Image (spheres, rainbow, N blue to C red):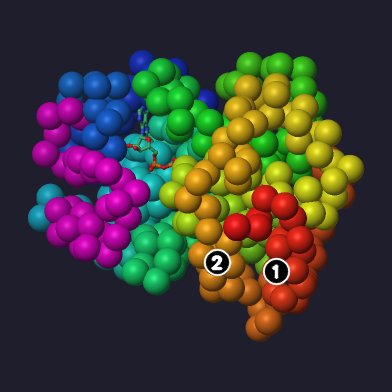
Amino acid sequence: MNSMKSKLTYLKMPELFEEFSKHQNDFFAVVDIKVKSHLPNWIQTSDKVFWLSDPEANKTLIMYEKVIDFFLKSGIGRTSKLIAIGGSATTDLTGFVAATILRGIAWKAIPTTLLAMVDGSIGGKVAVNARAGKNLIGAFHLPEMVFLCFDFLSTLPEEEWNSGKGEVLKYGFLSKKIHDLIMTDAPTEIIALECAKYKELVIENDFKEQGERVYLNFGHTLGHAFEATLKIPHGTAVAMGIKYLLEIFHSERLKDYHQLISRLKLNETDMNISSYSKFSIKDFMNFLEQDKKKIKNSIRLVLVEEIGKASILELAFTELKLKLESHAEFKN
Ligand SMILES: NC(=O)c1ccc[n+]([C@@H]2O[C@H](COP(=O)([O-])OP(=O)(O)OC[C@H]3O[C@@H](n4cnc5c(N)ncnc54)[C@H](O)[C@@H]3O)[C@@H](O)[C@H]2O)c1
């Protein structure tokens, strides 16, 4: 890997496939079937395209092998470039195929969900899920290019918009610039582009998450536990993770949370535990206990004391448990 940076490009739909169309014989792609109608006819009819349905359920080793077999039969070579077109589940799976097929080939990402545009397709963390948990089989393999084309978002369902906004909320705490863009009602595209650039810059400085990249996990430790136990979209769970972290550790920042979610037009009740009848504190704690970032008997949390200023708190798991259990909404 020569550079720790993907090239981030913003394009409208007609320009996006112009260059690719000149190399149709070497266009190997995994595409989320839900975005098929956005694509030019030559891609829709290509026999080098693997159409992926239900990407999250298929982010598995079984699908990984199917995709590899498909491309090997289609004549993919070591100098070919694999293209991923879809949300982060599609880019995660495709990136992992690219990291390993023929001992690794280059790949490019065309994210089609807001979440993938601001987060999932950037940074080169690629993975499939294992039976024991999400994203446990993976690699670091940066895409050479990430093409942001907001035209795809015209078909995105509201639930997926809200999930993407959950990750945008995270950036609103990590970066003063993004916070101010949200608070001044900047267009979504400007905010999303700024989030993508912010992540790209962090990755450039800390590709393997040994330093500041870890701050991008703000809201994710509790978030992953909400995602797994409530079966809600990733970004919505991250927004919940942020809310409860603030309530427990930095309640003075809750006013920022309320202002940001109001500007982002996120529904407050979606982030309240009390809105979910199936919440089980026991399942939640069991999940947290197995969190892969757990260090012996402690857990590492990212906190934001002020907008743009993150820090790490390493806390004994028992202490976190006590803090959570003393919160009214965690009692059940
Ligand atoms: N690699 C990373 O750094 C990273 C970061 C955050 C999240 N993730 C992963 O991302 C996944 C969640 O991301 P996501 O929400 O992008 O996932 P996703 O790919 O599952 O997409 C969500 C849904 O939107 C559909 N969809 C995609 N584009 C569409 C479009 N333009 N119009 C209509 N429907 C469309 C998909 O078919 C799917 O049903 C999880 O697997 C999570 O682990 C990875």
Q: Residue at x 42, y 66 (%)?
A: 133
**Residue 324: x %, y % from top left:** 71, 61
Would residue 47 be counted in the magenta stretch?
Answer: yes
Q: Which disc number belongs to residue 321?
A: 1
Please indicate, yes or no, whether residue 214 appears anywhere in the rendered image: yes
User: The residue tagged with tag 2: helix, strand or loop?
Assistant: helix
The stretch in magenta equals 43-72
Looking at the image, residue 15 lies above or below residue 64: above
Q: Mark 2 or mark 1: which comes first in sequence?
A: 2
Q: Secondary structure at mark 1?
A: helix
Q: Residue furthest bottom?
A: 296
Which residue lies under the disc numbered 2? 282
Q: Is mark 2 within 8 Å of ligand 1?
A: no
Q: Quadrant of the C terminus?
A: bottom right
Label 1 is placed on what type of residue?
Lys
**Residue 3, picture quadrant:** bottom right
Say which mark, if any, is on residue 174.
none
User: Is any atom of residue 201 visible in this view?
Assistant: no
Which of the pair 225/92 is nearer the observer? 225
Residue contact at pointers 2 and 1, CB within 8 angstroms? no
Horizontal side, residue 45 vs residue 4: left or right: left
Give the Cα separation between the discs numbered 2 and 1. 11 Å
